[in-house]
Amino acid sequence: MSLKVESLTGGYSRIPVLKSVSFDIADGELIGLIGLNGAGKSTTIKHIIGLMKPFEGTVKIDGRTINEDPETYRRKIGFIPESPLLYDELTLKEHVEMTIMAYGLDRERAWEIANHLLDLFRLTERLEWFPTDFSKGMKQKVMIVCAFIIEPSLFIIDEPFLGLDPLAIRDLIQLMEEHKRNGASILMSTHVLANAERICDKFVVMHDGEIYAMGTMADLRKHFDMPEATLDEMYGRLADREGF
Amino acid sequence: MKCTGGWLTGKGFKMTIRDMFKKRTNEYYSRLGKYLKYVFNDHFVIALMILTGALGFTYSDYVETVAPTDFLPRLLLVVIVYSVLPVGGIRTLIEPADGIYLLPLEKQMAPIMRRHLLVSGLFLSAGMTVIATLTMPLMEALNITGQAYSLSWIAVLICLKLIDLLVRYHSFQSDSLSLIRTINIGRHILILGTLGLSLFVSLWAGLALALGGLSGLLYLVFIFSRKKLWNWDRMIEVEQKRVQGIYRLINLFIETPYGQNKVKRMKGFDPLISIISSKTDPHMYYISRVFIRQTAFSGLYVRLLTIGLIVIYFTPVLWLRTLVSVLFIYLIGFQLLPLKQVLNESVHFKLYPYTNTDKIKAIQKLLNVTLIITSIIFSLGSLNGGWEATGIVFLISTLFAFGFNSVYVRRRLG
């Protein structure tokens, strides 16, 4: 699987938020999308998953845009949004069923994965619960379960650690690493820089709708001219430079 | 720093706490007026007139059977008045944020709260006068009222309502839960005692007890507890409950955006969901559950079904009965069309790799089931007109439902 974002310019109501953003992700790569609030991370993600149409530029998965083959394009993506998107009217079990149905998954295989994940996230006893009964962290776990049962080749994960307890964060990181080893690509937007530094192969640092810096930790250190710096320290430098 | 009790608004003039509550009052009544206008729509008024007529007829028949020495009608009056008395509290219009922002202006709340008490007292006294008037024929039949007695009965009920309000008002000033409970128990004893005296012994004695109780409470609230601080938590909680109660009532007839669109599990309907739902069509899987579990849809359906059923049952003429059935099937179908909006607004359906985009088909399937069930229920409501009437209502309603669904719905949603 390869994701290629090329000269992406897009935003809301003809006001460009993103200005010619380009980057790509190869098989088995985990890319951290980093930036201050309002940098354009979520807007980039919305363009990739097809919720927004670019003004200019393209987003391609395996060489094809969403318009060329929407069904195949979408089938390749597992999306975990920043704010859990759940149906108020469906129980946890029905969310899994709905995902199986909408993605045309093999029911037995999907439930096998789901049961493993539900057990991992301690949700097995809550299959009949509604989202309104869940805490934010539990909702996030449901989103994770639904995204992972699809077994997509590209994970788009927006702020996955928000609201999760430390055990769940550990389990999610393990899951991501496991899928990465199996060849899945992951684009993860996060402000939890210590985790990002630990697990990401490369970083795309965004600022004001543009790519500010890009590459491995070594590349970023070179870019910021901070040879021993952590991601957190470089982020601080970025904020200082921009007067935040 | 001296607190002046006002603040500058964006436009530069000083807004006082009094102005703020005045503004809230205006907004409250205009919102309430708007919803009541929808509640008392033409269909509801017709249904209400039929119901009122039927109840009036039954009541007048009952009164004719009452003898002056009867015990049960007196007991019935006690039960009616005792049940009606707690309805309606003090309209304070306090909002949750007031517990923080109005704390520095606490002393200025006293005249505002007194005004709230006065307005609520006057309004609810008018309500009690209506209750007293409605129960007058029964009082007459029991030989309790003459002309002077009629006024006394009204006065008793008003006193009891004011006692009820003063006890609530006192709880706004008291932070002692045990005292609030004790006074509350006292209120119940006083109310039951007054009603017992009025209806079984002497109306004058009842009035004297009510006046005594009222005087005692006036002393307790306005002299004994005068300088106490307000119990904001309680005031907020009570006002929230009061407003929710009103909207719960309004939501029986129309949907308001005041928290009544809830999701309920409705486990008992799971078999029905599995019949109308689909294991292959996510649209159908989802909207069948939305329809059953979201009270905005299921509640509306039940309300229209109930009102329609009552009107059909009480309508004596067959053609009118059929017309009402068709009208309510149209209303139900029409009110369910926003299900498409629910599907359109779902982000999930924009992300799913799902090519069957015929949302309309799913909605039509659901409407077919719903409207046919409705037409069966309406025809059963016509059983009092004989089998022929039942058959005609069912046939015409079902035909209309099919026509509505295949022509109107497709055109409207397409």
Image (tube, grey):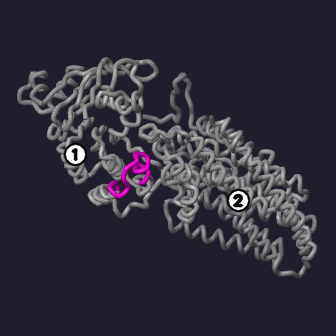
Left or right of B208 on screen, residue B338: left
Residue type at mark 1: give it: His
Chain to which mark 2 belongs: B
Is residue B235 visible to the viewer in this orientation of the structure? no
Residue type at mark 2: give it: Leu
Residue nearest the observer in this picture, A209 or B399: B399
Residue that appears at 70% across and 51% down = B253
Residue that appears at 41% across and 33% down = A70
Decide whether the magenta segment is chiefly helix, strand or loop: helix
Marks 1 and 2: in contact by CB < 8 Å?
Answer: no
* Residue under label 1: A179
Residue nearest the observer in this picture, A236 or B287: B287
Q: Secondary structure at mark 1?
A: helix
Residue nearest the observer in this picture, B161 or B272: B272
Q: Is residue B405 above or below residue A27?
A: below
- The image quadrant of residue B413 is top right
Q: Are marks 2 and 1 on the same chain?
A: no
Residue that appears at 11% across and 25% down = A219
* Residue under label 2: B162
* Residue B318 is covered by the magenta coloring: no
What segment is highlighted magenta in the picture? A97-110
* Label 1 Cα neighbours within 10 Å, binned few <14 / some 14-19 / many ≥20: many
| Residue B219 placement (x, y as % from top left) | 64, 60
Chain to which mark 1 belongs: A
* Label 2 Cα neighbours within 10 Å, binned few <14 / some 14-19 / many ≥20: many
